[in-house]
Amino acid sequence: MVIDAVPCELLTAPGPESGSNALSFVIQVRRQLGLCRLVGALDAVLDSNARVAPFRILLQVPGSQVYSAIACGATAEEINQHWEWLEQNLLHTLSVFDNKEDIVSFVKGKVKALIAEETSSKLAEQEEDPEKFREALVKFESRFNFPEAEKLITYYSCCCWKGKVPRQGWLYLSINHLCFYSFFLGKELKLIIPWVEVQKLERTSNVFMTDTVRVTTANKERDFSTFLNIAEAFRIMEQLADVTLRRLLDNEIFELDPGLQDPTQITKRDLEARAQNELFRAFFRLPRKEKLHEVMDCSLWTPFSRCHTAGTMYTSDSYICFASKENGCCTVIIPLREVISIEKMEDTSLLPNPIIVSIRSKTAFQFIELKDRDTLVENLLQRFKEVNSSNTFLAFGSVCTLGDDEPACLGTEASHGKERSECEKENNYLLNAEALRSDFHQSGMPGLDFGKSREQIKESLWDDHFVEYGRTVCMFRTEKIRKLVAMGIPESLRGKLWLLFSDAQTDLASHPGYYVHLVEASMGRCCMAREEIERDLHRSLPEHPAFQSETGIAALRRVLTAYAHRNPKIGYCQSMNILTSVLLLYAKEEEAFWLLVAVCERMLPDYFNHRVIGAQVDQSVFEELIKEQLPELAEHMKDLTALASISLSWFLTLFLSIMPLESAVNVVDCFFYDGIKAIFQLGLAILEANAVDLCNSKDDGQALMILSRFLEHVKNEESPLPPIGNHHAFFSDDQEPSPVTEIANLIHDSYEKFGDHSVEQIEHMRYKHRIRVLQSHEDTTKQNVLRVVIPDVSFLPEDLEELYDLFKREHLLRCYWAGGSAVPERHDPSRPYAEQYRIDAQQFASLFRLLSPWTCGEHTELLAHRTFRLLDDNMDQLIEFKALASCLDVMYNGEMNEKIKLLYKLHIPPALTENERDSQSPLKNPLLSTSRPLVIGKSNGDAVDYQKQLKQMLKDLAKEKDTKTEKELPKMSQSRALPDSCCDP
């Protein structure tokens, strides 16, 4: 860390000099509080480590006013140990360098490497000391007085900035709140921020603070700095905000990991494991159920380079994965179901700690330099047995004996075994055995010979690649294959490669017969999804002959209906029909189904639901990338919302709806290989190609026309297929000829100019923008609820808004500490806006005591429960905001007869129940009986109905009111009543 010099005492003279470059190491000790109170106070505020690390070693470069802190210690003995290490391991090597900049760079690199090694080797020691954590927990509970269910996750020493003034204190991170406490110079500061109110969470830097965590809510920004480990603190905050917001506000399809289901059991270790798991699954695009088990450095033998490639091995429930340390050099994904054996080899000096993983395609992978090899192999063999045993059962519950499956290779068919269920045999004829492209291939058209020759060249290149890098799902994935994909996959290989790149091939081979049974179970069933599917069937690539026939339409219907049956939380969403149509063109029907599963559940998470949260998140990420990569365009177009809105269809349909089909399939090729990153970088390339025209555009409509016209003229001259018009694209009346853009060139530019973003960077941006998108949906919900309720009440809009905030806060407080089942029972984003948030009787009673003008001492609780029962029309023990607002409106603003009517209803069923038999209560008429019909008995034996009695009471009240309002007019004298002329004789 580079710091400015501070007041200090020199304990030692400058260290040895290196050649002609006088390089100094000095030990500093901070001034004691008694010697300099101002400096001591500033140290305590500005450096949270000041009290525990009073000694440090600085690296000084002659001629520079900047020092580099390279070590710190709590005692003189500790700092002397660091000094001895410098003398023994560093100083004697500095004489090799002639340039002082090289020396500084070498020293900093050495120290960073030492820190990284120490961090990785002492990870367990960095866990909180149980005794210290218990002490922090006691302080947290006493300072903030939360219920016991509010579990503390971790805590950090840091500064909270109030303007330009820092306050040193402690940051407490719990499952539902971010809390800060400071007691400094006699002043106490308490800060509580619920995670559900956080609208933005980011790391920032400015002139005063080099690295700060900024927490933004609707009303304020809070900056926290001087963490000992800001990366860890921010990662935990990011995870807590994401988990809490999605658990409370996005439970439509969001499912927590098993270890996070119960909020009271969440630990810091669980959150760190979740972050690792999500990054691992995103990087290798694996199923959500995969749990990461081991991560270790190793080297893998790569035949194409004839050497061992250094990298990292990742093992999960069903996979062994490898990623080289050099980005893009080599990636391998090995499903355990493809593995034949896992063996240890003899340990030698050339091959330390090796293991061999053999797969079905008669290929073996050699890993070396594995630490704790024996434990690793034991764990892998155990999971290998579990995977093999689970493969003998179908997902739908019937037993299926699998034969020796052939590897999922190009040019060969994956065998699902000789034995299939009788049901599958009977229904095989219903399914398409080949891709629709083969049945509806248009040939014999002029100008296609060139495209066919290009296809043959591509096929030859791919064949050569398969020989060298492998042809199964376990192939070596390098930069070379990315270049081949960018050129466009040959028509004959496209469907198979999509299966391998997305790993849908593993799902297909692991679930023989599953799709047939889904089709059986779903066909003929009437549901909302089925109606939507039928409506969109003929809108799916209507220009393609495959979907002008019943064969294509029937296959599309079966795939979409089967998926809606498999995943009812998603069901069917618009744009799924367009994507599935293209999948059916290049893959068999069952293969297309599993490709759709891979896209909807792994590659585009949260895209296909009622609120398309995932697509909106990626819209926001794309907007940030525009500002970062195309600053001139972003500066000219101050509001990038229009561009982001235009891009929504790009993400939802992978450009299939706005680009000619023969060009768009090349985009889908890149998507299946690189994931959403390919769509981001292609979108940036399109905007860059049109940047000048967009900057000159006058409005959003003109910008839309420019982009639509450009995309309409993106051609694929190498395609062997005839051009197919795109009925989804936007057509302009402008008759000026537009230049043609070759799709291969556009994709190449996107990789060259915008392909440097890693999966980790994109995932972090998604975390950040998911918070904003969810909060935006909450604001929309609030505005719609208020718009519905305002016409029916007399409250001022600002008062009604405050009432809604109280209602929502009460709902959330109950969700915080009522257990995991409270959220889905009370919050459903798929319901109408006014019904999304609901409260129970206990929550209503709390609001009643706070807001109602009808409080009556000890009977307030009883009155609140009766009011709740009256408002609970459907008797589901929950009421919505509109009911609460209407009730309070009567109490505050209603006419007298409305208030009496409400009060009367509180004394009869359903407000009055059988259990309320306290005859002493003034709220209960002793004449009322809840066991008899709604009548009041009289002495003469007659009975009066409640409704008639209420109407009569209201009539009497109105008559009495009219009587009181009638005023007797003063008597007039005859002289005032008649004119003077009339009084004359």
Image (tube, rainbow, N blue to C red):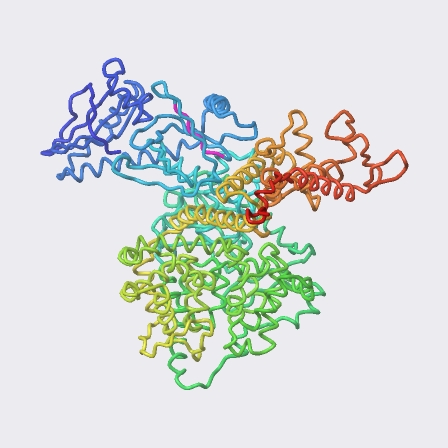
| x and y percentages locating residue 904 in the rendered image | 72, 37
- The residue most toward the right is 941
The mark tally for this picture is 0
Q: Quadrant of residue 337?
A: bottom right
| x and y percentages locating residue 250 in the rendered image | 53, 47
Image position of 632 (left or right of 361): left
| x and y percentages locating residue 92 in the rendered image | 19, 31
Image position of 512 (left or right of 626): right
Q: Quadrant of residue 735?
A: bottom left
For the point 68% across and 38% down, the residue is: 900
Confirm whether the magenta stretch covers residue 180.
yes
Say whether residue 716 is visible.
yes
Say whether residue 254 is visible.
no
Taken as a whole, is the magenta stretch helix, strand or loop? strand
> In front here: 275 or 411?
275
Q: Is residue 500 above or below residue 315?
A: below
Confirm whether the magenta stretch covers residue 99.
no
Q: Is residue 40 above or below residue 24?
A: above
| x and y percentages locating residue 43 in the rendered image | 28, 23
Q: Quadrant of residue 686?
A: bottom left
Image position of 705 (left or right of 857): left
Q: Is residue 727 above or below residue 197?
A: below
> In front here: 462 or 811?
811
User: Which residues fall within the magenta stretch?
Assistant: 177-182
Q: Quadrant of the N terminus?
A: top left
